[in-house]
Image (cartoon, rainbow, N blue to C red):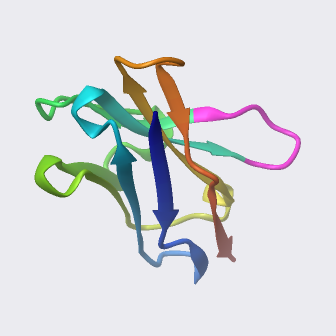
Amino acid sequence: QVQLAESGGGLVQAGGSLRLSCVASGSTNSINAMGWYRQAPGKQRELVAAISRGGRTNYADSVKGRFTISRDNAKNTVYLHMNSLKPEDTAAYYCNADAQVSPYSFWGQGTQVTVSS
């Protein structure tokens, strides 16, 4: 099993920045890719950014150039640096880990990001 704990959400004005952190525990050696997803009220959960164990990254078009995902394998931590935040970035942000242990995909509890205009 893998446990994920997010932190760093909050309320910020448009144009501001936040950094989200997600610390993994448990069977961390089994983790491959990690990522951040978000879900706004009434909308489906969507991928924001993902990073492989080797550092290859993937971003949603809506956040390219503004968000940066990074990973510290020694600390079992993945970060999401969010700059130039917009009101439409308001959502609950969830950390995800793909691992080689059942059930192979793990989720954190989520952290709320609210961007005021």
Q: Residue at x 31, y 28 (%)?
A: 33
Number of numbered discs: 0
Which secondary structure type mostly characterizes the magenta part of the structure? loop
Image: 13 above or below 39: below
The segment highlighted magenta reads 40-46
Residues 85 and 3: in front is: 3
- Toward the right, the furthest residue is 42
Describe residue 39's horizontal placement relative to residue 81 as left or right: right
Image: 30 above or below 94: above
Q: Which residue is drawn at 61% across and 32% down?
A: 46
| Quadrant housing residue 49 | top left
Task: Name the spot of residue 98 as percent of width and height, x first.
Answer: 40, 25
Q: Does the magenta stretch include residue 51?
A: no
| Quadrant housing residue 20 | bottom left
Task: Name the spot of residue 29 as percent of width and height, x first.
Answer: 22, 33
Residues 12 and 15: in front is: 12
Specify the quadrant that holds the C terminus.
bottom right
Task: Name the spot of residue 83 as percent of width and height, x first.
Answer: 38, 66
Task: Name the spot of residue 87 as percent of width and height, x first.
Answer: 66, 64
Q: Which residue is drawn at 48% across and 46% down?
A: 3
Image: 106 above or below 7: above
Describe residue 49's horizontal placement relative to residue 38 as left or right: left
